[in-house]
Image (cartoon, rainbow, N blue to C red):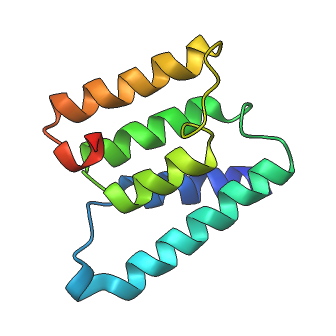
Amino acid sequence: LTFKIEKEILWEICHHQRLDLNKEQNKLLFNQELLREVLNHWITKKKIDEFRETIIEATLRCIQNDNVKILKIMLRHCGYDRIPNYNYQRHNELMQFINDSAKNASFDCIK
């Protein structure tokens, strides 16, 4: 049950449009912290690979919403910032993220 709820939390956070820092800073900080807690829990339970499909879908949603701050957390915690050369699947996923960023004109996400 916990993992199901955490998946819903992940999806909800990534589904939101980019928040305006001036108006909604507390909500953004709360979402960032909650996302870190969910992903850290999955890391400690070794569930990241099991939930990879959900992670990819949520990451693509972040990109579509140009939600850079949440995207950075997703990429860092899900291992996209340190992909070994031999892991072609992760490289392909990263290329999918880059292509989707270009398609959605989410240029901040490409950086």
Quarter where residue 101 is shown? top left
Quarter where residue 1 is shown? bottom right
Q: Could you say where residue 71 lies in the image, as x and y percent from the top left?
A: 41, 51
The answer to whether 96 is drawn above or below residue 106 in the figure is above
Q: Could you say where residue 94 lies in the image, as x and y percent from the top left?
A: 44, 27
Q: Could you say where residue 51 lies in the image, as x and y percent from the top left?
A: 68, 36
Q: Locate residue 33 relative to residue 110 in the image: left or right.
A: right
Residue drawn at the location 44% of the way across and 53% of the way down = 72
In this view, which residue lies farthest toward the right? 45
Closest to the observer, 3 or 76: 76
Residue drawn at the location 46% of the way across and 43% of the way down = 58
Q: Locate residue 10 relative to residue 29 in the image: left or right.
A: right
Residue drawn at the location 55% of the way across and 39% of the way down = 55
Closest to the observer, 73 or 104: 73
Residue drawn at the location 64% of the way across and 16% of the way down = 87
Image quadrant for the C terminus? top left
